[in-house]
């Protein structure tokens, strides 16, 4: 089962991916982690990517997509994978689709988590990270996962917040890219939605992200 995840920052996309990872024993692949592994490992693509990152520039698709494709072809992905954080725009969606087809790899399920932009912003600003496991859900603005004071509700670990989670301008900038239905991330999601309408082998799933975490998980599992 090969799954592609879409959802704005604050939608719980990473948490749902982590749950599926455990339930179906599939690697949860995040584009940012791929960059870090390749740069740390000194791969040719990693070194090329680092040149752009060090200059504060976006890494070109010609480097990013081969890096992602290489990761999806590793041994732990033989029984499927969960890809999160890429593509971020329609052009990348087209190129990823072409690369997967050229490599004879199927895309079985595309998941889009729907969430109002203002709710997503509030969730980001309320997010707290556990020092023991960043996937432990803690958010001061969501009653169901509100931490125990300043301690993780799951394990009691210390909590911190990312600086960019408290930067409204940075959040708005990220969301402007995601919610752009012409060329941005939602446009890339819609590209795969349109493909799925004419391809019985691909399923496009939408989930209501404002629901409680367990309810979103239950809906997701029921639709897979």
Image (tube, grey):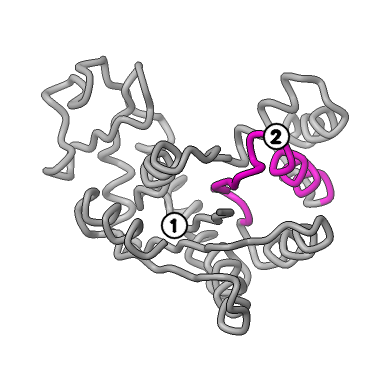
| Residue at left offset 18%, top offset 38% | 145
- Label 1: state its secondary structure: loop
Instruction: Say how many tags the image has.
Output: 2
User: Which is nearer the N-term, disc 2 or disc 1?
Assistant: 1
Please check the rendered image and state whether residue 80 is part of the magenta-colored stretch, yes or no: yes
Quadrant of image for the C terminus: bottom left
Left or right placement of residue 75 versus residue 196 in this view: right
The vertical placement of 135 against 157, above or below, is below
Give the magenta-colored segment's residue range. Answer: 62-87
Image spot of residue 43 (x, y percent): 83, 26
Image spot of residue 134 (x, y percent): 38, 27
Left or right placement of residue 142 versus residue 222 in this view: left
Residue designated by label 1: 7
- Label 2: state its secondary structure: helix
The vertical placement of 20 against 105, above or below, is above
Image spot of residue 197 (x, y percent): 56, 82
Tag 2–tag 1 contact (CB < 8 Å): no
Left or right placement of residue 76 versus residue 45 in this view: left
Q: Residues within 10 Å of mark 1 (few under 14, many from 20)?
A: many
Residue that protrudes farthest toward the bottom in the picture: 198
Quadrant of image for the N terminus: bottom right
Q: Residues within 10 Å of mark 2 (few under 14, many from 20)?
A: few
Please check the rendered image and state whether residue 53 is part of the magenta-colored stretch, yes or no: no
Left or right placement of residue 152 versus residue 175 in this view: left
| Residue at left offset 57%, top offset 48% | 83
| Residue at left offset 44%, top offset 63% | 112
Q: Which mark is residue 75?
A: 2
**Camera-side residue of 125 and 223:** 223
Task: Choose mark 2 or mark 1, whichever is in front.
Answer: 2
């Amino acid at each position: 089962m090969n799954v592609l995840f879409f959802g704005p920052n604050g939608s719980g996309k990473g948490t749902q991916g982590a749950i599926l990872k455990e339930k179906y024993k599939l690697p949860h692949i995040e584009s940012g982690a791929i960059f870090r592994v390749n740069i740390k490992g000194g791969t040719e693509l990693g070194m090329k990517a680092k040149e752009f990152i060090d200059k504060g520039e976006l890494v070109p698709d010609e480097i990013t997509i081969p890096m992602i494709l290489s990761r999806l072809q590793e041994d732990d992905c033989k029984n499927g994978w969960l890809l999160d954080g890429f593509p971020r725009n329609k052009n990348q969606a087209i190129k990823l689709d072409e690369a997967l087809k050229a490599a004879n790899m199927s895309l079985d399920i595309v998941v889009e988590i729907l969430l109002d932009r203002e709710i997503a912003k509030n969730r980001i600003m309320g997010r707290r990270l556990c020092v023991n496991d960043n996937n432990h859900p803690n958010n001061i603005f969501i009653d169901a996962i509100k931490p125990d004071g300043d301690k993780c509700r799951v394990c009691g670990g210390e909590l911190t917040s990312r600086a960019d989670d408290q930067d409204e301008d940075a959040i708005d900038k990220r969301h402007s890219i995601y919610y752009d239905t012409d060329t941005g991330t939602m446009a890339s999601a819609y590209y795969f939605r349109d493909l799925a309408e004419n391809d019985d082998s691909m399923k496009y799933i939408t989930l209501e992200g404002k629901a409680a975490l367990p309810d979103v998980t239950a809906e997701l599992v029921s639709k897979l």
